[in-house]
């Protein structure tokens, strides 16, 4: 048996990823107030109540085709059915009765007269001298759409905590729903920390690092349907950081910070949250990422990301998005993944989950970015998703199945 050195220092308590995600799911509940919105504006909103159908769809039994309707009993007696002069049309009540042995032309979507139980398609019908000649086998009930076969009145359609998609709207509108109670959008503030940072709108002096985390996080927040609030950037100075955090608590439901999350002497985010805030958890057994802070500053939750852009990005996808969704009222959300074969060989230390920047190559295999550098933003240009490698795994070989999360699973596209 090979002996693997543990990847994480023994002196710290490293929280497994699954435990961190379970804590998020169990302990954080929706923060925002409720509002009533019209159904047509509901796309992207999160339901604060289950939705029930107000009416059935179809509302009446109707024809699925343009064709000819009759009673199947008439056909057992004769194959030649007398056609009525009038036709049945959608949206227009049909007042005539259809005598035994008769048939009627009926258009798609028309309510079925009660004497009719079968419709044959116009393309299959032979008409001769005012008669419908039925010379093919018929099936009682064919081409008829039953009342409520899609939606039953009173049926539960969606659960509380569901985020409405554009494709949901078809059902909600067909079910006669006109408005619904949803959560107001979660307000998410973003603060970058680091004395070396320049904002992308200003001319950086030579040694400055351009603050990439803040515009990236703000656009992701916007994309996810939350309300982004820009708290700017702040130098590594406890007084200034305290001020910004205080300001953030007035403006937002939750604050995302990046940088200063570790235990270095200039890492004031972690020291302030530890000493003056309330730390929930800190070190997670994940790469890239450690350390990652969940804390409270006054009443407001602070999610403290590492400064390295890739670590900040990956941790936002893996922990930030589930946390924000939970706080916004969206429950039971999980990013979709699928298993694909690796096109590479790569080893890893046990004891932590790793996320490798990856993409699917032309042959349908997963390939990973050559370097693990946590500051390499070009790895995000190159990749289309992440490969998740389990805690206990130490080696991936070509042909092994790996768990792949496309970025679209995190609603980034
Ligand atoms: P820190 O987590 O503060 O120790 O920062 C780790 C690394 O990430 C350093 O090289 C920082 O310069 C860099 N970094 C921190 N914040 C940002 C940011 N907002 N944008 C780009 N790089 C950053
Ligand atoms: Mg820093």
Image (tube, helix red, strand yellow):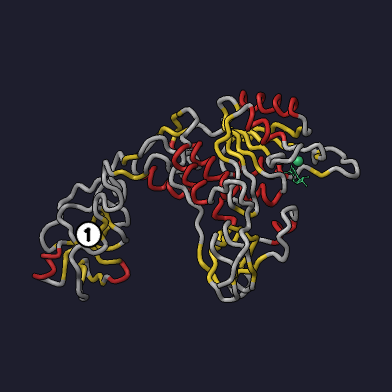
Question: Does residue 87 show up?
Answer: no
In this view, the residue in front, 374 or 95, is: 374
Provide residue 190's location: percent of width, then percent of height: 66, 36
Which residue is drawn at the image coordinates 75% and 55% (left, top)? 376
State the residue position of label 1: 104
Direction from residue 320 to residue 50 in the image, left or right: left
- In the figure, is residue 289 to the left or right of 162? right
> Closer to the camera, 308 or 43?
308
In the picture, residue 395 is in which quadrant?
Answer: bottom right
Structural crowding at the residue carrying mark 1, measured as other residues with C-alpha within 10 Å and reported as few (<14), some (14–19) or many (≥20): many
Q: Quadrant of the N terminus?
A: bottom right
Is the CB of mark 1 within 8 Å of ligand 1?
Answer: no
Residue displayed at 62% across by 34% down: 255
Name, please, the residue furthest toward the left: 77
SS for callout 1: strand
- Does residue 136 appear in the picture of this structure? yes
Residue 193 placement (x, y as % from top left)? 74, 36
Query: Front-most of 22 and 208?
Result: 22
In this picture, residue 298 sits left or right of residue 130: right
Q: Is residue 355 above or below residue 329?
A: below
């Amino acid at each position: 048996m090979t002996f693997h050195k543990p990847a994480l220092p023994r002196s710290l308590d490293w929280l497994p990823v699954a435990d961190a995600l379970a804590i998020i799911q169990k302990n954080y509940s929706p923060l925002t107030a409720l509002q009533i919105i019209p159904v047509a504006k509901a796309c992207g909103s999160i339901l604060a109540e289950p939705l029930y159908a107000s009416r059935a769809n179809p509302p009446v039994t109707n024809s699925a085709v343009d064709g000819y309707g009759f009673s199947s009993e008439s056909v057992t007696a004769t194959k030649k059915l007398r056609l009525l002069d009038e036709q049945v049309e959608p949206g227009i009540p049909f007042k005539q009765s259809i005598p035994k042995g008769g048939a009627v032309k009926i258009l798609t979507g028309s309510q079925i007269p009660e004497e009719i139980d079968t419709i044959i398609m116009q393309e299959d019908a032979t008409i001769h001298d005012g008669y419908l000649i039925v010379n093919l086998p018929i099936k009682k009930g064919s081409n008829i759409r039953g009342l409520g076969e899609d939606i039953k009145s009173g049926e539960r359609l969606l659960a509380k905590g569901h985020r409405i998609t554009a494709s949901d709207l078809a059902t909600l509108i067909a079910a006669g729903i006109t408005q619904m109670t949803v959560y107001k959008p979660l307000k998410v503030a973003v603060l970058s920390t680091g004395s070396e940072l320049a904002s992308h709108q200003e001319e950086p002096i030579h040694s400055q690092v351009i603050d990439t985390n803040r515009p990236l996080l703000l656009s992701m927040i916007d994309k996810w349907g939350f309300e982004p609030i820009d708290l700017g950037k702040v130098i590594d100075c406890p007084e200034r950081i305290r001020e910004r955090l205080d300001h953030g608590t007035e403006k937002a439901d939750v604050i995302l910070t990046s940088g200063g999350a570790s235990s270095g002497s200039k890492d004031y985010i972690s020291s302030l949250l530890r000493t003056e805030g309330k730390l929930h958890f800190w070190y997670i057994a994940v790469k890239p990422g450690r350390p990652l802070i969940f804390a409270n500053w006054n009443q407001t939750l602070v999610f403290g990301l590492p400064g390295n852009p890739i670590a900040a990005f990956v941790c936002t996808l893996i922990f930030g998005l589930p946390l924000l969704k939970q706080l916004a009222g969206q429950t039971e959300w999980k990013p979709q993944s699928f298993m694909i074969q690796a096109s590479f060989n790569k080893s890893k230390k046990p004891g932590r989950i790793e996320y490798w920047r990856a993409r699917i190559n032309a042959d349908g295999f997963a390939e990973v970015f050559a370097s693990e550098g946590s500051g390499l933003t070009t790895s995000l240009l190159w990749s289309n998703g992440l490969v998740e490698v389990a805690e206990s795994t130490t080696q991936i070989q070509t042909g092994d199945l790996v768990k792949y999360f496309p970025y679209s699973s995190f609603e980034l596209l």
